[in-house]
Image (tube, coloured by chain):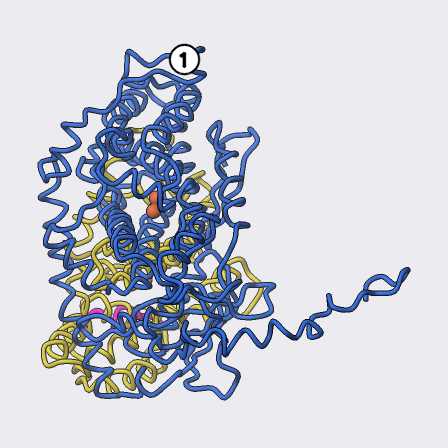
C-alpha cells in the first residue's frame, strides 16, 4: 500500500496490513516459533501429592512445563496468579489510551487497524484470565481485585495519548517492549501461561509493526506531523523503559521468579535488549530518542543509556500518574454499567436451564466463513466427546476450580479444528450463559484470524478428568504394551513408507 | 451529474460507515469482555463494507475521490445514511435494538443485491454472511434482555420503542418491510416484548437531512483529518 520496500504481510480476518518490518525484529519472531516447538503437555502423568516438592523441583530442573493438575508449592501458584493477573489487567486497561483515538483515526484503514488492535488486547485479556483460572482463581475475583486497586497493571497505561502520533509511539515502544518481555516469557515454566503467551506474542508483533508503520508514514509527512512524532516519542520512551520493572537489584519478586523459571530473564537484561533493538528503528524513523547519554559502548557490545526514573515509576504504580484515577474510574464504570446486562443473561439462562449443569453439551460451529450464522448451536450431540488428556489446560485443579463468575456466566472450554487439522484441539476458555453464546464468543475470540473451521464449546464442569492419584492404574498398563505402536515393528530392509 | 447507481452505492456505504463508527464507540466499554470482542468484530465487518462501497462510489463518481475523501471531507448534509444508524448508542439495549433493525434490513437487502454478477452484487455477496451474523447476534441479545430480569425487560422495551419510528426510513421505495417484519416480529415475541405501533416516521437521511447526532459524530470523526489538509496518514 504505502511503500515498495520488502514487506511482510500480516493477515487479520478482515485486516490485511502490509508493513515494513522494523529492523531487528525477525529474530524475535524466530524465538516465538522456537518456544512454540518446546516441550508440551500431555507427555507425562501429573505430579501427585506423594511426589511433592521433589517431583516439582525435578521438573523445574529439567526445564519441563508444570501443568494445572500437578502438585505445586503454594508460593509458586501465588506468584503465577499475581503475575498473570497483572498481565491480564494490563491488556484490558491498555485498551483505553488507544480506544481514545478510534473515533478520530485519520483514515479508514488506520481506523480498521486500530479497532483490530484494541480488540486483540481484549482477546489477550481473555486468554490470560482463562490461564489464571487454571490456577483456581476466578476472573471475577481478579477483576474485583483490579477494581479495588489491590492488583496492579503496567504503569505506562497511566500516561495520556495526546495526539494521533501517540497511538503510533505507544504501539511501537510499549508493544515493542511487551514483545521483548513476553518472547522471553514464552519459555515460562507454567504450561498454560507459556501456550497463551505464544499466541499473545504473535499478535503483539502485529501491534508493534503497525505502530512503527504509522510513525514511519507520519515521519515522512508534513513538518507538523514530524513534530508530532518526535513529541510522542519523547513522551513514551521512558514509560516504555519502565515496563521492564525496577532494576534487578531493587526488584522484590525477580530472584524467586527466575529460580522457578516463571521469568526467564532479568529486568535489566530485557531492558538492554529493548534499547539495542530500538536504536536502529529510531534511525529508520528519523526520530531522536530522548536520552543524551544514549550511545554505543563497544566494550560492552551494547548501548549505554539513562535508566528510567524508578522513583517516578513507584509513584505511578502507587496511583499518582497522570491518568491513574481516570483509567480506574472508567474501568469501574464500565463494569458497573454492564452489570444489568450480565445479570439479565444469567437470569435468562437460569429460566431456560438447558444449561451447563445438564452435562457436556457440545455445540458445533462453523468458522466465520460459513454462511448463515444465526445460531450455530446444535445442542447435545451424540458424537464422541473431545478427549482431554491429563495435564491439559482444560482440566481444572481438583476437577472443579472456578465454574463461572458471580453473575452466573459459566466457564466453557473451547476446542477448535484448524483449517487443515483433523481433530479439535483445546484452544482456551470463555464465559457464557448458554451453548449458543459460548459458541459465538469462542468464534469471535479464537477464529478471528481465520484459524478455524469448526468450534466446540464444552461446559468446563462437564469435563471428567483423570485424577493424579489414579495415574498408575490408568496409564501405567499402557506402558507395557509397546506392540500397540507402529514403531514396535522394525520394517524389513528395503521396505519404505510402511 | 451523478447516476442513480452512484447514489445507491453511496447511501449504502454511508449506512455502513456511520453504523461502524457508532459500533466502534463500544470498544473498551462493553458489558463483558467477550462482548467487547464481538462488538469490535461487528464494527470491523461494517467498516470493511463501508470501505468497499465508498471506494466503488468514488469510482462511479469519476472525480477521483477515494474512500477517505468521501468519509472525511464531506459535510453532514452530504451524507446519505438513514437516521437510524446515526442515533446515539444509548445503553446496550438501544445498541442491540438498532443492530437488530438495521442488521436484519441489511441482510435482506444484501441477499437481494447479491443475485447477479455486478460489482455491487459481489460486495453484497461478501457482506451478507457478515450481516447474517450481526442480525443473529442482536436477535439473541434482544431475547436474553427481553426475557432476562425486570430491569433488562424494561430497558429492552424502551429501546425498541425508541428506535422503531426510525425503521420506516429503511424501506422507502422498497417492498422489503413485510419480509423484515416477518423476521423481527418473532424475535420480539420470543423476547416477550411488545411490537410498537407504527406511526411517527422520521425521514430525510437519504436526502441529507439528519438528526443532531450526526453533526456531533462527524465533528469528532473528521477533526484530525481536516486539521491537516493534504497530509498522508
Ligand atoms: Fe496485548
Ligand atoms: Fe498489544
Q: Residue furthest right?
A: A494
Q: Nearer the viewer, residue B163 or B73?
A: B163
What is the letter of the blue chain? A
Q: Mark yes or no: residue B70 visible.
A: no
Magenta segment boundaries in residue numbering? B165-173
Image quadrant containing the C terminus of chain B: top left
Q: Quadrant of residue B177?
A: bottom left
Of A335 and A14, the residue lying toward us: A335
State the image coordinates of residue A116 (x, y, percent, origin top left).
Answer: 37, 50
Q: Residue at x 48, y 36 (%)?
A: A28
Q: Determine if residue A176 is in view.
A: yes
How many neighbours does mark 1 have within 10 angstroms: few (below 14), some (14-19), or many (20 or more)? some
Against B106, is B18 above or below? above
- Drawn side of residue A153 relative to residue A55, left or right: left
Rendered colour, chain B: yellow
- The reply, left or right, for residue B55 in relation to residue A333 is right
In the displayed structure, would residue A115 be above or below residue B127?
above
Residue A44 lies, in percent from the top left, at 51, 64
Q: Which residue is mark 1?
A: A296
Q: Quadrant of residue A73?
A: bottom left
Judged by its main secondary structure, the magenta piece is helix
Q: Depth check: A79 or A172 in front?
A: A79
Residue shown at 38% from the left, 42% from the top: A182
Q: Nearer the viewer, residue B40 or B166?
A: B40
Amino acid at each position: 500500500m504505502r511503500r515498495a520496500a520488502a514487506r511482510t504481510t500480516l493477515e487479520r480476518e478482515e485486516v490485511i496490513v502490509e508493513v515494513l518490518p522494523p529492523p531487528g525484529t525477525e529474530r524475535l519472531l524466530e524465538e516465538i516459533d522456537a518456544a512454540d516447538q518446546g516441550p508440551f503437555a500431555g507427555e507425562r502423568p501429573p505430579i501427585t501429592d506423594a511426589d511433592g516438592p521433589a517431583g516439582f523441583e525435578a521438573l523445574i530442573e529439567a526445564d519441563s512445563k508444570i501443568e494445572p493438575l500437578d502438585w505445586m508449592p503454594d508460593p509458586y501458584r501465588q506468584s503465577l496468579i499475581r503475575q498473570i493477573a497483572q498481565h491480564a489487567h494490563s491488556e484490558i486497561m491498555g485498551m483505553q489510551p488507544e480506544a481514545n483515538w478510534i473515533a478520530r483515526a485519520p483514515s479508514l484503514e488506520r481506523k480498521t487497524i486500530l479497532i483490530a488492535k484494541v480488540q486483540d488486547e481484549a482477546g489477550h485479556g481473555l486468554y490470560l484470565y482463562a490461564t489464571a483460572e487454571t490456577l483456581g482463581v476466578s476472573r471475577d475475583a481478579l477483576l474485583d481485585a483490579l477494581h479495588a486497586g489491590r492488583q496492579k497493571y503496567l504503569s505506562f497505561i497511566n500516561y495520556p495519548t495526546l495526539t494521533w502520533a501517540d497511538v503510533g509511539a505507544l504501539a511501537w515502544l510499549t508493544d515493542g517492549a511487551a514483545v521483548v518481555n513476553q518472547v522471553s516469557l514464552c519459555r515460562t515454566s507454567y504450561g498454560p501461561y507459556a501456550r497463551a503467551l505464544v499466541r499473545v506474542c504473535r499478535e503483539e508483533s502485529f501491534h508493534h509493526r503497525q505502530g512503527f508503520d504509522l510513525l514511519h508514514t507520519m515521519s515522512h509527512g508534513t513538518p507538523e506531523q514530524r513534530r508530532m512524532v518526535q513529541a510522542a516519542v519523547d513522551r513514551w520512551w521512558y514509560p516504555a523503559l519502565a515496563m521492564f520493572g525496577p532494576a534487578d537489584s531493587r526488584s522484590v519478586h525477580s530472584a524467586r521468579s527466575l529460580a522457578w523459571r516463571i521469568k526467564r530473564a532479568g529486568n535489566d537484561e530485557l531492558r538492554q535488549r529493548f534499547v539495542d533493538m530500538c536504536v536502529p528503528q529510531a534511525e529508520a524513523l528519523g526520530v531522536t530518542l530522548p536520552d543524551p547519554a544514549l550511545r554505543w559502548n563497544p566494550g560492552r557490545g551494547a548501548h549505554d543509556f539513562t535508566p528510567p526514573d524508578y522513583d517516578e515509576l513507584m509513584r505511578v504504580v502507587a496511583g499518582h500518574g497522570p491518568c491513574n484515577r481516570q483509567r480506574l474510574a472508567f474501568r469501574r464504570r464500565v463494569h458497573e454499567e454492564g452489570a444489568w446486562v450480565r445479570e439479565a443473561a444469567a437470569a435468562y439462562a437460569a429460566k431456560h436451564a438447558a444449561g451447563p449443569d445438564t452435562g457436556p453439551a457440545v455445540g458445533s460451529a462453523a468458522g466465520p466463513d460459513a454462511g448463515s450464522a444465526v445460531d450455530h448451536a446444535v445442542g447435545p450431540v451424540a458424537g464422541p466427546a473431545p478427549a482431554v488428556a491429563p495435564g491439559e489446560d482444560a482440566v481444572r485443579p481438583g476437577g472443579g476450580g472456578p465454574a463461572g463468575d458471580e453473575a452466573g456466566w459459566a466457564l466453557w472450554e473451547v476446542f477448535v479444528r484448524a483449517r487443515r487439522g483433523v481433530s479439535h484441539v483445546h484452544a482456551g476458555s470463555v464465559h457464557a450463559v448458554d451453548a449458543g453464546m459460548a459458541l459465538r464468543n469462542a468464534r469471535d475470540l479464537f477464529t478471528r484470524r481465520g484459524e478455524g473451521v469448526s468450534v466446540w464449546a464444552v461446559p468446563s464442569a462437564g469435563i471428567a478428568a483423570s485424577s493424579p492419584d489414579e495415574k498408575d492404574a490408568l496409564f501405567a498398563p499402557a506402558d507395557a504394551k509397546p506392540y500397540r505402536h507402529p514403531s514396535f515393528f522394525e520394517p524389513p530392509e528395503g521396505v519404505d513408507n510402511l | 451529474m451523478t447516476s442513480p447507481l452512484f447514489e445507491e452505492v453511496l447511501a449504502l456505504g454511508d449506512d455502513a460507515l456511520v453504523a461502524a463508527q457508532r459500533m466502534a464507540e463500544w470498544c473498551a466499554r462493553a458489558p463483558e469482555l467477550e462482548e467487547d470482542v464481538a462488538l469490535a468484530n461487528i464494527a470491523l465487518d461494517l467498516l470493511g463494507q463501508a470501505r468497499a462501497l465508498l471506494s466503488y462510489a468514488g469510482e462511479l463518481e469519476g472525480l477521483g475521490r477515494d474512500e477517505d475523501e468521501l468519509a472525511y471531507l464531506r459535510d453532514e448534509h452530504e451524507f446519505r445514511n438513514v437516521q437510524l444508524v446515526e442515533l446515539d448508542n444509548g445503553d446496550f439495549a438501544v445498541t442491540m435494538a438498532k443492530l437488530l433493525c438495521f442488521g436484519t434490513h441489511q441482510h435482506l437487502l444484501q441477499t437481494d443485491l447479491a443475485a447477479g454478477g455486478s460489482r455491487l452484487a459481489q460486495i453484497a455477496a461478501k457482506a451478507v454472511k457478515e450481516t447474517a451474523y450481526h442480525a443473529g447476534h442482536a436477535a439473541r441479545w434482544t431475547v436474553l434482555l427481553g426475557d432476562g430480569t425486570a430491569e433488562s425487560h424494561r430497558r429492552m422495551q424502551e429501546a425498541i420503542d425508541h428506535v422503531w419510528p426510525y425503521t420506516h426510513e429503511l424501506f422507502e421505495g422498497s417492498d422489503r418491510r413485510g419480509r423484515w417484519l416477518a423476521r423481527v416480529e418473532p424475535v420480539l415475541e420470543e423476547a416477550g416484548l411488545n411490537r410498537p405501533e407504527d406511526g411517527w416516521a422520521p425521514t430525510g437521511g437519504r436526502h441529507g437531512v439528519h438528526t443532531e447526532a450526526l453533526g456531533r459524530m462527524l465533528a469528532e470523526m473528521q477533526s484530525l483529518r481536516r486539521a491537516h489538509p493534504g497530509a498522508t496518514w
